[in-house]
Image: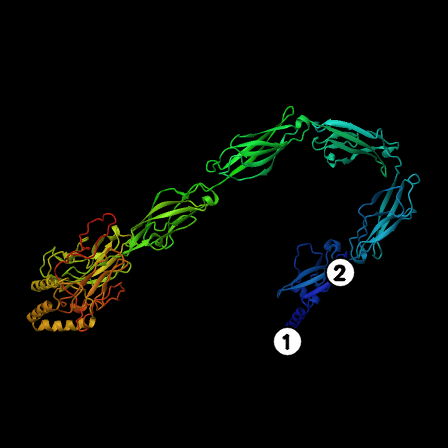
Amino acid sequence: MGVWWAPAVRVLVLQVAWALGGGQVRYSVPEEAKAGTVVGRLAQDLGLEAGEAEARRLRLVAQGRRASVEVSGASGALVVSSRLDREELCGKSAPCALRLEVLVERPLRVFHVELEVTDINDNAPLFPAARKNLSISENSPAGSRFPLEGASDADIGANAQLSYALSPNEHFALDLQKSNDRNVVPDLLLTKPLDRESVAVHRLVLTASDGGRPPLTGTVELVISVLDTNDNAPQFNQSVYKVQLPESATEGTLVARVNATDPDEGVNSEVTYTATNFIPPSGRDVITVNPTTGEIRLTGALDFEDVSVFDFRIEARDKGWPPLSGHCSVELEVLDVNDNAPEVWVTSLSVPVPEDAAVGTVVALLSVSDRDSGANGRVRCAVWPASPFGLVATFAGSYSLVLREALDRERVSEYEVEVRAEDGGAPSLRASRGVRVPVLDVNDNAPAFAQAVYTVLARENNAAGAELARLWARDPDEAGNGRVSYSVAEGGGGAVSGGAWRSASSYVSVDAESGRLWALQPLDYEELQVLQFEVRAVDAGEPPLCGNATVQLFVVDENDNAPALLPPAGGGPGPGAAGEAASGPGSGALWAWAAWGAPAGQVVAKIRAVDADSGYNAWLRYELWEPRGKGPFRVGLYSGEVSTARALEEADGPRQRLVIVVRDHGEPARSVTATLSVSLVEGAEAALAAAGSSSSGPGLRAAEGDASASAATNVWLVVAICAVSSLFLLAVVLYGASRWAPRAAVLSGPGPATLVCASEVGSWSYSQRQSRSLCVTDGAGKSDLMVFSPNFPPPPGPAAKETQPEPPALLDTVSAPPFPAPSRDAPAPLSPFSPAPLAGGGGGRAQPPMPEGGGRWAGAGGS
């Protein structure tokens, strides 16, 4: 156990020490060390025992460049494997450190080793070239300084510190200039004037030494040539040259040829020519001299009107050192040619010109000139076209452009007038100047609409602010005179809504700038079908002018009203609740009697409904929803008449419950559901019910009375019927004749009234108020009033209790002053039954198979 524990403890201690020490081993080796040189005992420094280096495969991880060191497999030492060149590895960077990765397996560990390669003095100073040529004039003064290029050393530190020495010479010395903290730059200093005739060439040796031990050196040969002194200046054969040229002379024309001589020899006698001192300075752009031959030529065009005389000097300079020069003057006179066309200038322009300006109004002042002289500069002018403007000469070279005819901006809004000028040269030259004369608008045109009458179609229930149409009025004037604003004319139209006149501005508005016509509120076809009004367009001129257009707005009906059930028309079944929209249809509870053995085709009841919409949206159809299949009853598709489909049998049960859906033809269709309970009785009972129904006056009310009173009455009725049928029937007849006899006046009577009225949105509803009230809609259409007083108790049996619907919520209505309230002791109204068919179904008239136009259909208040 101790044999294995000791190595583990040693490895653990080594790892802790390695972590505390940063995990890195550093070695140093000089460059150019021989192959096989031991750099360090890597295995031992990594804490490996003897023999572990080879067993655990201690090795270097391969690097991107060729490795210059390697690990000895047996000893685990780090040795040099190839030449180490610090300058190749690191250049001028100091220190030069190589970062190595060492890999040990079993267990796998990676160590980082840093190897620093130290510099040795193995590079001598090196000059850019082995020979340097210098040229110095023999008259250069003592103390003149000539910079030299220094040497460079690839080593670093003290091995790269350079010093310079110059071979002995009586004319030159070496002056060292410090360029930075490490290097110096040599300058050659002239200590004694030179004499070319004595020594023409000096050869010196510049030596550079580094700071190594031992130092290394580099040399460069300095070859100094002494230049001859130039002591004779060139001389011209004449001091002034005078030349005349026409301004039409082309580029390249020879102006003159000058010549200068120099008595010196060699380069000191070679002369070059240069043109200087141009007056005016623009002459250097049109005149040049050949530096070798002395020929003066034109390099640009001459312009007499710009410069008539050019003065300049010619300098002749020899090629000696220092160069000497001589000078002469040249005078070039330019002769005039008719090369300039007349010029027309607008000195004053009074635009725009009002279209009502008077004849003779001055529009512009013109100035005409010609830069030529003599006959070439005399100019005559004319204006084109001749109307409506003309030219009037004021004094020499000045003209006035005046108005000679009346203007009309709507016919011509702008004129392009051309003033033409011609000089008296041969050949003559011409020029012209265009004058743009805009005409200022005057408000002399009223806005005019594209149409006198606009027809606009708008769907009802549109969103408030929806755009209905765009109106546009044209005003040929411009700016404010043609800027049109729109408005609905006051008193220009309206419509009758709810019995009151409403102006068009309460329905629509027009944008003052764009003429967009939008709705101020949603339009209701049932309230408004046609709205006619006037739109006024007014411009912003002074004084403003206006125009009008008539707008006929037709409201297009949409299917926004669901069918509504109507009360029975005397003795028939009555709806118990108002219908709802197709999306959430309500239901109406109706009662009817039918006798056993009634033949097929006998009308039992008639469902009456109305739709506040028009056209297809108000065309109603009736469908039997329940029961489906072969039931004993059927309903007329467009008449709403419920009739027997076959002879009634006892197997059909004592009562039939029919669910009838009333739909319109709108898109999407809306519907209301009516529930009809048909009680099947004996023929005598049916006849008695029919007799009671015929004497019941205006009709039977729906089953929507007070629930508690109905329940008590139903119990009493059941007991009474079971006790004595004849007494019950007699009591019913007598009670009906005395209590619920038909009233001569609709708005009077002791019994509680049930009111059916058209609401503001065109639907039908019931009122359960115990006091009589009057409900009138805002609009004139379908605003019928119907009041019913129940006469008969419900039929015997449990069916009476099941058919009592829950009273619907009270509806808010616009009511007239209420009638006197009935006594609180008055009994609650009961739902009547009647076997007779309803009269006046479908809104008071039979509905055709297809609607005609947009007229209202199924009006309330049937027979």
The C terminus appears in which quarter of the rendering?
A: bottom left
**Mark 2 and mark 1 in contact (Cβ < 8 Å)?**
no
In the rendered view, tell whether residue 710 sits above or below residue 35: below
**Rendered image: mark on residue 230:** none
Residue matched to label 1 = 2
Q: Nearer the viewer, residue 851 or 367?
A: 367
**Residue appearing at x 38%, y 42% in the figure:** 450
Q: Residues within 10 Å of mark 1 (few under 14, many from 20)?
A: few
Q: Residues within 10 Å of mark 2 (few under 14, many from 20)?
A: some
Q: Is residue 257 visible?
A: no
- Disc 1 marks a residue whose amino acid type is Gly
Which of the two discs, 1 and 2, labels the residue nearer the N terminus?
1
Q: Nearer the viewer, residue 559 or 819?
A: 819
**Is residue 292 found left or right of 727 in the rendered image?**
right
Say which element carries label 1.
helix
Q: Position of residue 720 (x, y in %)?
A: 10, 73
Q: Position of residue 478 (x, y in %)?
A: 47, 42
Q: Position of residue 760 (x, y in %)?
A: 28, 59
Q: Position of residue 214 (x, y in %)?
A: 85, 56
Instruction: Report the coloring of the rendering.
Output: rainbow
Residue matched to label 2 = 29
